Image (spheres, coloured by chain):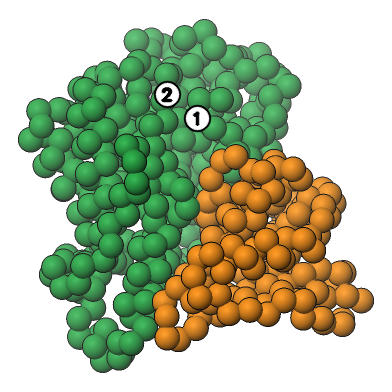
Chain colours: A orange, B green
């Protein structure tokens, strides 16, 4: 797949992070899937919460680590998934979670490592990394993956 | 008051496939898949097996009848979880129960999983008095629910990001324990000094009973960053105790403040984190000191199980409430929906 870096920034504070969320959201439309990569505590859920607010979701976007999927109706349908505690991608198909790719929704997926190889169609990836000197600073990178 | 009711409860909302039969407030059987699979596989529970509801639902319901020593025609009703949870998982239990209710011609009722947890406490403590405040704490939920009477729920506080059980499980992971390791933090903390490090308590601005736990997890991450493995290892119990106390303090203070504000007669804790020893001890002390009653469910009704679903179903059916055969599964069902 062709990878294309669309945005790469160092966010020093919450307001920079919001800036990244706003700038990246411009690329997403109904039907898109965004894989979120980043260690525990890097802010994947927080970023999705910002997207939710910007897309008109009027309730709190909370962590889907336990529930595996949370769904929100904003200006567009949002599926927020988290495969942290899923060990085998077969489980996702058993549970019917592959349906989300045909819902015309925007799908944000945390801990997508177990399915990243199976997503062989156009999608986006966001990488979040810690910046050593400051606990609230992060590197954000938005990449488009195209066939 | 429940009288001569025999209710089958079925729960397939998440990881567990479970079936139970209760007679009024008495549990005749309560079969839970992880225990069954555990026996089958001799210690190791494969995640996939534990979530294979379709394969497990029939044998588990059969086993529930066998252990209860009643026949299917003795049932007076069927209760099943219809949300919140994974839609594919919920539909297994829901469709099975619809079919069974139709073939036996008995009333059928859909139950909210969280309502089930609250009624798990009534199974252990039928004498619970109203107004009653329940603190629901698990891997996926952190809520304060006020009840003025049976089947009436007012959610007065909930988490805005992570559930407290997730703060425990992910905190354990950051400390190098296997996931989910919440109960292990509790064990290590018993030998530790909670004043070793002050982790932040998130009380949020304004007059509310909401919770936030993602900051606590991040504060542990930041704290551990510049610590050596030797330091972490030699102060492990103290770090666990400090972290656990930060998580529990907020629960205790918020629950106590809510109990006082709404002048409740009794307070209960339900959900998997209700097994946490510090939470049980601290909240019980505060509630009893303020002259309210404190109720805890038996351990088997803390984690996901079908007896609690049957008990909530008994309450609804006795109040004349039934579900129609068109009832669907609702992945994000709210308690007062």
Q: Quadrant of the N terminus of chain B?
A: top left
How many residues crowd around disc 1 within 10 Å: few (fewer than 14), some, or many (20 or more)? some
Identify the residue position indicated by label 1 in the image: B335
Identify the residue position indicated by label 2 in the image: B153
Q: Residue at x 21, y 37 (%)?
A: B256
Element type where label 2 sits in the image: loop
Residue B329 place in picture, x, y as percent:
67, 34
Residues flagged by tags 1 and 2 on a common chain: yes
The residue lying furthest to the top in this view is B320
Q: Residue at x 22, y 44 (%)?
A: B253
User: Quarter of the image holding residue B321?
Assistant: top right
Give the Cα separation between the discs numbered 1 and 2: 7 Å
Of B7 and B234, nearer the camera is B234
Q: Is residue B239 visible?
A: yes
Q: Quadrant of the C terminus of chain B?
A: top right
Question: Badge 2 sits on which subunit?
Answer: B
Q: Mark 1 near mark 2, Cβ–Cβ under 8 Å?
A: yes
């Amino acid at each position: 797949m062709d990878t294309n870096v669309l945005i790469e920034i160092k966010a020093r504070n919450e307001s920079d992070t919001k800036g990244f969320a706003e700038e990246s959201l411009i690329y997403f439309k109904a039907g898109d899937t965004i894989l979120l990569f980043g260690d525990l505590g890097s802010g994947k859920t927080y970023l999705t919460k910002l997207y939710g607010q910007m897309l008109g979701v009027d309730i709190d976007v909370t962590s889907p680590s336990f529930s595996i999927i949370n769904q929100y109706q904003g200006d567009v349908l949002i599926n927020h998934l988290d495969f942290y505690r899923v060990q085998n991608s077969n489980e996702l198909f058993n549970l019917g979670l592959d349906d989300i790719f045909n819902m015309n929704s925007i799908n944000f997926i945390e801990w997508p490592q177990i399915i990243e190889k199976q997503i062989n169609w156009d999608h986006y990836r966001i990488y979040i990394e810690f910046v050593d000197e400051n606990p609230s600073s992060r590197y954000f990178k938005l990449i488009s993956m195209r066939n | 008051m429940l009288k001569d009711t025999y209710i089958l409860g079925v729960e397939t909302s998440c990881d567990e496939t479970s079936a139970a039969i209760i007679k009024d407030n008495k549990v005749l059987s309560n079969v839970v898949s992880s225990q069954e699979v555990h026996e089958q596989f001799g210690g190791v529970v494969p995640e996939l097996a534990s979530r294979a509801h379709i394969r497990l639902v029939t044998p588990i319901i059969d086993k529930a009848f066998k252990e209860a020593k009643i026949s299917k025609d003795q049932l007076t009703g069927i209760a099943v979880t219809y949300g919140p949870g994974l839609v594919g998982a919920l539909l297994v239990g829901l469709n099975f129960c619809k079919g069974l209710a139709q073939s036996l011609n008995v009333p059928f009722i859909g139950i909210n999983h969280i309502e089930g947890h609250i009624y798990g406490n009534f199974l252990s403590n039928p004498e619970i008095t109203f107004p009653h405040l329940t603190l629901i704490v698990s891997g996926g939920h952190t809520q304060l629910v006020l009840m003025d009477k049976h089947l009436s729920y007012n959610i007065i506080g909930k988490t805005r990001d992570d559930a407290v059980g997730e703060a425990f499980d992910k905190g354990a992971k950051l400390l190098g324990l296997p996931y989910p390791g919440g109960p292990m933090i509790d064990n290590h903390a018993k030998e530790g000094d909670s004043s070793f490090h002050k982790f932040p308590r998130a009380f949020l601005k304004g007059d509310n009973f909401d919770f936030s736990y993602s900051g606590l997890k991040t504060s542990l991450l930041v704290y551990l960053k510049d610590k050596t493995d030797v330091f972490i290892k030699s102060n492990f119990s103290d770090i666990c105790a400090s972290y656990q106390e930060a998580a529990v303090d907020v629960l205790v203070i918020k629950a106590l403040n809510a109990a006082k504000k709404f002048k409740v007669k009794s307070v209960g804790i339900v959900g998997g984190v209700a097994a946490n020893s510090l939470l049980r001890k601290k909240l019980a002390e505060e509630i009893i000191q303020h002259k309210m009653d404190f109720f805890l469910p038996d351990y088997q009704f803390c984690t996901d199980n079908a007896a609690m679903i049957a008990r909530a179903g008994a309450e609804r059916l006795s109040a004349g409430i039934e579900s129609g055969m068109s009832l669907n599964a609702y992945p994000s069902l709210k308690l007062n929906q």
